[in-house]
């Protein structure tokens, strides 16, 4: 009885300190609601995924028909499947907004370096999970997308061929591949949930950043009842957009070729991944060399880890950094261009546009972020010296 009471008090204390009385900067905007909505998306994906797994058959001869069985014969199966498919897109939309918000407001700066890096780990795990999930319906784009992407590992010197055979479970994309991807697609979301808990712990260690970028322990209010209202409104906004796609445009963000059963003997005219992979797919295709393209695509993700350590600016608030604001919005436009290029055919002028956009993407992280900080420091010192 004593142990039960102690555990209850302990859990109540954790809930109170990390949710109810959690000190929140009083000037937070709705841009800080993307984190909580991302957590809601993760819960939706896990729950709908568990229910789909009850009826899905991970076998190349049965997978496509089992998805159709879910859609046609399982009670509300169409709803669960559309929620899961469109939920992946909603998840990525929210996370992309969350990442760009953090980038804009300097959430990667000291003392939140580990917080930023843990978020990047979650993003990479999301991409891996989404790719494996895209294979499971075993449609044309599923099969050929898996073939193209897994073949990229063959570019790695010495061990590339062995890695590809291990991913395939044989000498081609076949039943063993589908089983492996299904198992990992089911398990990795729980790993994401674990890393998310670490992410939240790191967030609460130093507290949330704020639009001005100042560090203060004075100008804060309890999360409840002040800030939860903003999160609640963001939740209803997410549900509204989510429901609109599920009920009215359920296939708008999918590829029609995936409603054709996989056929290893017929190659689609144009193989493209899901829309949320397109910017990185464009980076891959912008390099004519296979190994170079794989390295560039991987580097486009790894470079996100470097931001907290290459940043040289001591100013968080973007309103005090006019040059950074210009560079940031150029990055946003460049990222959208990469997404547009990723779905185009590999031909002129799309090749050249993709190459220029790739250079701009890497230049922002490797040169603009460290260079702007040094320039701002020198500018401040010059102004102080001239007074």
Image (cartoon, helix red, strand yellow):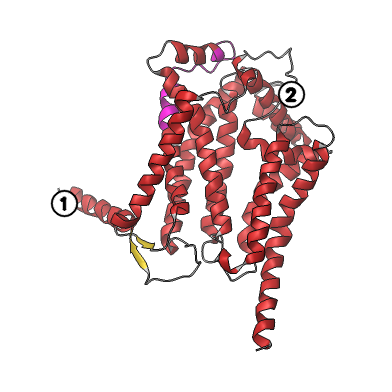
- Tell me where residue 130 appears, x and y as whole percent: 56, 33
Q: Is residue 127 left or right of residue 187?
A: right
Left/right placement of residue 332 relative to residue 203 reads right
Q: Residue at x 16, y 51 (%)?
A: 2
Residue at x 67%, y 26% (from the top left corner): 145
Q: Which mark is residue 2?
A: 1
Query: Residue 376 appears at what percent x and percent y?
Result: 67, 72
User: Does residue 80 lie above or below 306 as drawn?
Assistant: above
Residue lying at 41% horizontally and 24% vertically, measured from the top left: 51
Image x and y of residue 176, in percent = 61, 20
Q: Nearer the viewer, residue 87 or 110?
A: 87
Label located before the other in sequence (2 or 1): 1
On the image, the x and y values in percent for residue 56 come to 48, 18
Residue span colored magenta: 46-64
Between marks 2 and 1 in the image, the one whose residue lies nearer the viewer: 2
Residue 150 visible in the snapshot: yes
Q: Is residue 160 above or below residue 217?
A: above
Residue at the extreme left: 1
239 over 15 or under it: above or below: above
On the question of residue 158 being in view, the answer is: no
Element under disc 1: helix
Residue pointed to by mark 2: 270
Residue 49 falls within the magenta-colored stretch:
yes
Q: Residues within 10 Å of mark 2 (few under 14, many from 20)?
A: few
């Amino acid at each position: 009885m004593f142990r039960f009471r102690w555990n209850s008090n302990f859990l109540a204390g954790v809930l109170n300190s990390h949710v109810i009385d959690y000190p929140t900067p009083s000037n937070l905007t709705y841009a800080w609601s993307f984190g909580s909505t991302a957590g809601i998306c993760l819960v939706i994906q896990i729950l709908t995924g568990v229910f789909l797994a009850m009826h899905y058959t991970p076998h190349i001869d049965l997978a496509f028909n089992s998805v159709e069985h879910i859609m046609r014969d399982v009670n509300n199966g169409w709803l669960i499947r559309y929620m899961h498919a469109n939920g992946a897109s909603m998840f990525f939309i929210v996370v992309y907004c969350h990442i760009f918000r953090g980038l804009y407001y300097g959430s990667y700066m000291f003392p939140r370096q580990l917080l930023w890096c843990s978020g990047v780990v979650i993003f990479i795990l999301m991409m891996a999970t989404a790719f494996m999930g895209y294979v499971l319906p075993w449609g044309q784009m599923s099969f050929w997308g898996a073939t193209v992407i897994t073949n990229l590992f063959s570019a790695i010197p010495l061990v590339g061929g062995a890695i590809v055979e291990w991913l395939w479970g044989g000498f081609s994309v076949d039943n063993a591949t589908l089983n492996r991807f299904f198992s990992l697609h089911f398990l990795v979301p729980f790993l994401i949930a674990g890393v998310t808990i670490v992410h939240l712990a790191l967030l609460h260690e130093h507290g949330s950043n704020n639009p001005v970028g100042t560090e203060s322990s004075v100008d804060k209010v309890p999360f409840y009842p002040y800030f939860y209202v903003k999160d609640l409104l963001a939740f209803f906004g997410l549900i509204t957009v989510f429901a609109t796609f599920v009920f009215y445009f359920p296939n708008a963000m999918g590829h029609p070729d995936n409603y054709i059963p996989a056929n290893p003997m017929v190659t689609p005219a144009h193989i493209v991944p899901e829309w949320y992979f397109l910017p990185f797919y464009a980076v891959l295709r912008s390099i004519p060399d296979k190994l170079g393209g794989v390295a560039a695509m991987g580097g486009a993700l790894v470079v996100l880890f470097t931001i907290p350590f290459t940043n040289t600016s001591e100013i968080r608030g973007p309103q005090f950094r006019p040059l950074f604001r210009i560079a940031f919005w150029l990055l946003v436009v460049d990222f959208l261009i990469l997404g547009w290029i990723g779905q185009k055919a590999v031909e002129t002028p799309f090749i050249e546009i993709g190459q220029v956009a790739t250079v701009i993407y890497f230049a922002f992280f490797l040169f603009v972020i460290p260079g702007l900080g040094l320039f701002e420091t020198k500018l401040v010192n010059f102004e102080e010296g001239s007074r």
